[in-house]
């Protein structure tokens, strides 16, 4: 089985393409009748689906993985543990599931990128959902120590009340940019002119 496209995507950090590449290779191998179960990079495949937030596909892939592979490759189970946390919406435990396994060199890059992306996603979620939040809860959702979480959010403009151990969220200004397209303006003018005459 030729995994050069997958290896290239991992080397160039095109992690958003990993799941599609793996799916295509799997369908190709299945259609050609090639036995691939023993050598298949299931951990990378699962993480690829998780990276693009396609938890449903990760779940179905998990169901297709042979039991012998699940038992003999702990990295596959560790990858699915992250998927389980996301599936049941236990967002705070995702970072814990990432940190509790020592990932292989092949998975380290995509896991680090996913972890960083997930932290940003949780930060944006906290920013949109809360006006004030405790330091402890922020650290839990960001997967950091309380000190690191406080430093992280302060860098983004949040303020800290040391007495109550609460953070005040700085809301991002919503910027809506309207582009003036002369052709649309011309059509609107013609339409209004037509209605008036």
Image (tube, rainbow, N blue to C red):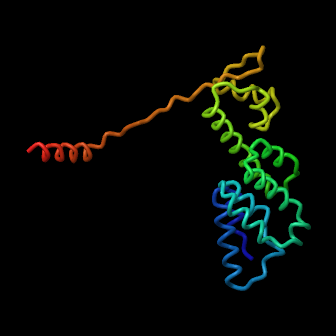
Say left or right for 22 vs 139. left
Residue sitting farthest toward the top: 163
Q: Quadrant of residue 20?
A: bottom right
Residue reaching furthest to the left: 197
Q: In the rendered image, which quarter is residue 50 located in?
A: bottom right
- Quarter of the rendering occupied by the C terminus: top left
Residue at x 80% of width, y 52% of height: 108
Q: Is residue 41 above or below residue 166?
A: below
Query: What residue sits 79% from the left and 29% below the top?
Result: 136
Say which of 96 and 23 sits in front.
96
- Side of 18 where 107 appears, left or right: right
- Residue shown at the point (70%, 59%) measured from the top left: 48
**Residue found at the very far right of the displayed protein:** 72
Image spot of residue 42 (x, y percent): 78, 66
Number of numbered tags placed on the structure image? 0
Q: Nearer the viewer, residue 115 or 59?
A: 59
Q: Is residue 21 left or right of residue 106?
A: left
Look at 79% across and 56% down and name the residue there: 107
Q: Is residue 102 left or right of residue 167?
A: right
Residue 31, compared with residue 20, is above or below; it is below
Residue 155, x across and y down, in percent: 68, 26
> How far from the left and from the top, in percent, is residue 33?
72, 85
Q: Residue furthest front?
A: 88
x then y, percent, for residue 88:
75, 51
Q: State the quadrant of the N terminus.
A: bottom right
């Amino acid at each position: 089985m030729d995994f050069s496209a997958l290896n290239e995507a991992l080397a160039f950090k095109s992690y958003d393409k990993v799941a599609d590449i793996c799916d295509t290779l799997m369908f190709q191998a299945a259609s050609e009748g090639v036995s691939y179960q023993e050598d298949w990079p299931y951990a990378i495949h699962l993480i690829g689906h998780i990276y693009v937030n396609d938890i449903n596909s990760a779940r179905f892939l998990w169901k297709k993985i042979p039991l012998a592979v699940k038992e003999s490759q702990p990295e596959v189970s560790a990858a699915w543990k992250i998927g389980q946390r996301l599936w049941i919406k236990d967002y705070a435990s995702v970072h814990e599931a990432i940190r509790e396994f020592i990932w292989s060199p092949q998975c380290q890059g995509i896991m680090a990128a996913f972890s960083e992306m997930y932290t940003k996603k949780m930060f944006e979620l906290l920013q949109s959902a809360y006006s004030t939040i405790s330091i402890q809860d922020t650290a839990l959702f960001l997967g950091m120590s309380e000190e690191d979480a406080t430093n992280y959010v302060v860098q983004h403009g949040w303020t800290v009340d040391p007495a109550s151990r609460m953070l005040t969220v700085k809301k991002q200004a919503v910027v809506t940019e309207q582009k003036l397209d002369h052709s649309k303006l011309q059509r609107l003018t013609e339409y209004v002119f037509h209605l008036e005459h």
